Amino acid sequence: MPLAPVAHDRLLSLDFIRGLAVMGILFSNITAFAHPTLAYSWPGALPAGGWVSDGWVWLFQFVLVDGKFRGLFTLLFGAGLYLFSERLLAGGADDRVQMRRLFWLLIVGLLHFVLLFSGDVLTLYAISGFVILPMLHWSARRQLLAGLVWYAAGTLLMCAAMGSPAMLEGSPERQAESSLQWQGLEKAWQDRVAETAQEQQVVQSGNFAAVIRFRVTEHAGALTQLPWLAVMETIPMMLIGMALYRMGFFASRPNRRRLALAWLGLIGGALATLPIGLWVMAERFPPFLTDLALFGLSAFPRLPMVIGAAALLVWLTPLVQQGWLGGRIIAAGRMAFSNYIGTSLVMVLLFQVFATDRFGMLHRLDLLGYVGMGCLLMLGWSEPWLRRCRHGPLEWLWRCLVYGRWLPFRR
């Protein structure tokens, strides 16, 4: 028989979590769509160096949004890798189909990076997926243990790498003792600030071809950092997602003990993250300390928050799946690939093509309206589309490329 997707019943909990995650990722990324890349992590790159409200919105995102929805997505991607491999074996295929799937994801991710958004995550997932393929056949217990230890070690390494600049930044005495190192760090920071000004000028010129050239020439270095991020965070999170799927985490509602642990992870993680954010705010967002907090220190409480949130959403799924909103979120999750790329397209058209005068001019509070609009678009079109079609447009194209033939599109 010709190779084709294996028919299966969907795990609604995966779609529900994925739908919320793709909307949360828009919240996390909106600043990078509407501003030069540096503004994503550093409020000082906002107009007039940022308002007081920008600091408070940053704190809210830092505690509850940034990294959390990406973490959920990464868990689900790991679960999906194992689920796909499991169904390939059931259909008599092997991991070569999985490799084709990751190859085409890599191609789409690179196109997304070049044409729309330098913060693309698909390229990162494809790279991590290739590395993790041999680990699909480990036992679930080994995957979980390896993922937890690996994640902790990666976080420690990230903190060590980013901690030294932050310590120098906060101590004039250390700066004097390590003057050459500090001068190099200062120059690198000034180069980033200059690149930010150049990026804003290029986008506001209204020449989108120049924007693409700038992204390719100036942001291509971000691609070289992806293997580092894959090793430090993404691969161990995927291993944890695989193990949790195999242990029935996404298929069965949590009992009281697991619910209590989920709330403890979510609330405890948020409470542990809050003082880190308040510390950065109190210091008025020094650049290297801000990076350490966002990409290093916050990773420790992030993992229990992500796993706790996932458990609570699994518990919530059967309660909301028959409702209007729950059904719309599940549909958005079934079309997460199309929604992720689609929201990038919408936001790029809004800020970098049709209304370039807005680029770099809005504050974080102003951008919340655009997040709401993007979420309403995802909720509004996904369910009607799936009533008429079997898959989202990009999901269908991806499957056709993977299986090497045209697959049924309409219901």
Image (spheres, helix red, strand yellow):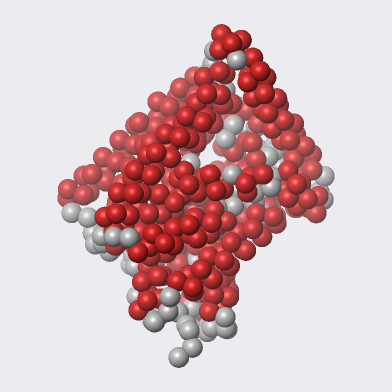
Give the position of the N terminus as an image quadrant: bottom left
In terms of image quadrants, where is residue 221? top right
Tell me where residue 123 appears, x and y as whole percent: 57, 56
Location of residue 336 with respect to 149 vertically, above or below: below
Q: In which quadrant of the rendered view does residue 90 lie? A: bottom left
Q: Is residue 353 above or below residue 82?
A: above
Q: Residue at x 59, y 30 (%)?
A: 43
Q: Quadrant of residue 269?
A: top left
Q: Residue at x 35, y 59 (%)?
A: 242
In the displayed structure image, the side of residue 329 where residue 103 appears, left or right: right
Q: Position of residue 371 (x, y in %)?
A: 55, 48
Say which residue appears at 43% left-offset and 37% top-offset.
155
Compare residues 372 and 299 and report the one nearer the observer: 299
> In the rendered image, is residue 313 in sight?
no
Vertical side of 41 occupied by 211: above or below: below
Q: Position of residue 335 (x, y in %)?
A: 50, 66
Relative placement, left or right, of 133 versus 368 is left
Q: 188 or 257, which lies in front?
A: 188
